[in-house]
Amino acid sequence: MKPAGRLLTAALVLTILTRLIFVLLPRVPLETKVVASVGDSREYIALASNLADSRTFTRDTVPPFRPELFRTPAYPLLLAAPLLLAPPSSFIPSSPPSSFILLSLVLQLLLSLLTVWLTHRLALELGLAPATAAFAALLVGLSPNLAFLSSKLISEALFIPLLLVCMILLNRCRRTASVAGLVAAGVCSGLLILTRPIATFFPLLIAVYLIYRALNPRAAAHRLSPIASLVFLAAASVVVAPWVIRNGRKTGRYIISTASEHNIYLYDAATVVASQKGITIPQARDVMMAEAEKEYGRIDTTDEATMWQKLSAVARRHFFRNPARAAPVWLFGVAADFLNPISVGPLLIHSGAAPAPGSANLLQSSLALLVKGRVTQALRTAWKARIGGAPTFILVVLACAFVFNLVLIWFGFASLFLRRTRGLFWLLLPIIYFTFVTGTVGDARFRAPIEPLLCLLAAVALVRPLRPAPTKPPDLSPELVSELTRGSCSVGLGTPGTHA
């Protein structure tokens, strides 16, 4: 087996080992590590359970069953597969049986292995050397953040390999201008939206890029037609349209999700209001709720479609009214998305440790302090609520994650200045998009979709091909040049057979 093949095999083996470490360690109940550590897991399990039992997409367990508008259906459908294959005798979403958890973890391990292989495949498709592609796959397998998130029942497990497939298909379109590949990429983009609503505007960004490729005179021989962007958007829309129609018929609002409305009210605008008024995040939310009730009357919390529409309208006014305050809040949140090595709050619960007082909305509270220039207080608060007094397991994982993240950022950034990465600059489109749209929700979990791409860029800088040192040609004197010239002429004029 060639060295690159051995490195890829090592990447797949290490992927299994790193995932097993988080599943087996520390010795706390499996449900605590897999389900309780991230609150979203219980919601996905409830959705999967209702899909398997009654073919309805709702989190409610008792009537009236309200249609789900926040979560999109792709990942719950995946989680429903273990329930259909091996339905337990009794299933309570709030406390799922171990058999369901184990089957789901096996499914997610397969998705992790697929992610490693797809990273390797994407690197080869981009024209990188086999050793570089295998090393990028190795980095993905070693990532503490990705390994930790793979032990949780959250949608990133499906979203990451889907994004890599989309990138592979788009790269083939760039090289061959294949219509079939373009349609497949559009379908994959639609599936991304149905997995995580954060991808809602990603197809629009890709469509703009396709128009740029079509109009760029320096593009390769296989230049895309300007109509390619419409084909791409049409394919993505066909996938998403049934879901939008379902929401419109059930609630009157033809939307993909209320996720953006959740985020601007609960995080973005709340952080700005808290920073302006010097209050806590929950108090800031209460302020906006009171404004919404004053403007719209009593808010019906059972009607999620209209509730979030009203709350987000008030929140947007607070967020965009003061751009001088909102911009740094947003940028600090984006920076946290990169600098946070791992999701510390879920890691605490995963290890059986109770989060310290004040840990709820810690990121947003810290951002409010940073915007005011109170850096020391923000760092002291974060340390006290998250790391101070943490178990040894957490400290070891944090140290490994910090070193890995530092290497990833340093070499990923350095790769942008290498000549051989110029053909990879288009990968910055998903990296920038999925970083900036997280805003103040920024956490290591939300960096997960782009981490394989960061690993790929870092591998380009880390695996530098060995080249022989250039040798300086010997200095030739005029006399030696004249003698060599006469000698070559005499050889050239010699009779055949005079030299061996």
Image (cartoon, rainbow, N blue to C red):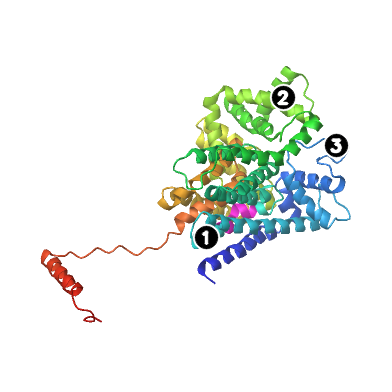
Work out whether residue 46 or residue 385 is closer to the camera in this orientation and state it.
46
Q: Quadrant of the N terminus?
A: bottom right
Q: Amino acid at mark 1?
A: Phe
Q: Which residue is mark 3?
A: 65
The one nearer the camera, 176 or 430, is 176
Q: Quadrant of residue 435?
A: top right
Where is 80 relative to 230, above or below? below
The amino acid type of the residue labelled 2 equals: Lys
Mark earlier in primary sequence (3, 2):
3
Could you tell me residue 144's position as x and y percent? 59, 54
Residue 268, given in percent of the width and then of the height, sits at: 62, 31
On whether residue 140 falls in the magenta region, the answer is yes
Q: Which residue is mark 2?
A: 310
Q: Disc 1 or 3, which lies upstream in sequence?
A: 3
Mark 3 Cα-neighbour bin, 10 Å: few <14, some 14–19, many ≥20: few
Query: Horizontal placement of 96 versus 440: left or right?
Result: right
Determine the image quadrant of residue 496: bottom left
- The stretch in magenta equals 139-148
Do tag 1 and tag 2 residues touch (Cβ < 8 Å)?
Answer: no
Q: Residue furthest front?
A: 495
Please rate how many residues cluster around mark 1, counting C-alpha atoms within 10 Å: few if below 14, some from 14 to 19, many from 20. Answer: many
Give the alpha-carbon distance from disc 1 to disc 2, as whole Å.
49 Å
- Considering every residue shown, the one lying at the far left of the view is 479
Q: Is residue 235 above or below residue 460?
A: above
Left or right? Give the position of 221 relative to 198: left
Residue 491 in the image, given as x and y percentages of width and height: 19, 74
* Precedes in sequence: disc 1 or disc 2: 1
Secondary structure beneath label 3:
loop
Residue placed under numbered mark 1 in the picture: 135
Quarter of the C terminus within the rendering = bottom left
Does the magenta portion include 376? no
